[in-house]
Image (cartoon, rainbow, N blue to C red):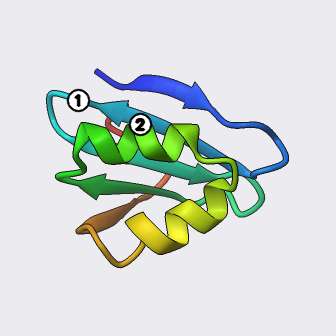
Amino acid sequence: MFQRDVASARSGIRKEVSPERRILSISFVVSGNRYEFEDVPAETFAAFKAAFAKGRYFNNHIRNHFRYRRVVAGNDPG
């Protein structure tokens, strides 16, 4: 079960977390691309949620730090 936490439109990022599966799902509003990042600790999700600059936090602490997969439309488990 994913818990949704939609960021402001200014950030251009929507995020969801599945704590029991440790998956962080991030959708980029402009491109429509969605990615699921695996084994993301709850602390990382909380820090991302609290970050003033979501894009900067994503680039510095999530991107290239966790295994991920792109979710293709129609193949969305949520």
Q: How many residues crowd around disc 1 within 10 Å: few (fewer than 14), some, or many (20 or more)?
A: some
Along the polypeptide, which appears first: circle 2 or circle 1?
A: 1
**Residue bearing mark 1:** 19
On the image, the x and y values in percent for residue 63 come to: 42, 72
Q: Is residue 48 above or below residue 20?
A: below
Question: Percent from the top left, x then y, of residue 5?
Answer: 55, 27
**Is there any visible trace of residue 74 in the rendered image?**
no
Q: Amino acid at mark 2?
A: Ala
In space, the residues marked 2 and 1 are separated at their CA atoms by 11 Å
User: For this rendering, which residue is in front, 37 or 41?
Assistant: 41
Locate residue 23: give its quadrant: top left
The kind of secondary structure element at disc 1 is loop
Res 46 quadrant in image: top left
Q: Quadrant of the C terminus?
A: top left
List x then y, in percent, for residue 36.
35, 53
Q: Which residue is mark 2?
A: 46
Marking on residue 9? none
Please identify, in this view, whether the residue under mark 2 or under mark 1 is nearer the observer: 2
Residue at (54% x, 61% y) in the render: 57
Q: Nearer the viewer, residue 35 or 55?
A: 55
> Which amino acid does the dot numbered 1 rest on?
Pro
Can residue 71 be seen in this snapshot?
yes
- The N terminus, quarter of image: top left
Check if mark 2's residue and mark 1's residue have beta carbons within 8 Å.
no
Q: Is residue 61 above or below residue 73?
A: below
> Depth check: 35 or 64 in front?
64
Secondary element at tag 2: helix
Question: Residue drawn 24% across and 50% down?
Answer: 40
Q: Residue at x 26, y 67 (%)?
A: 66
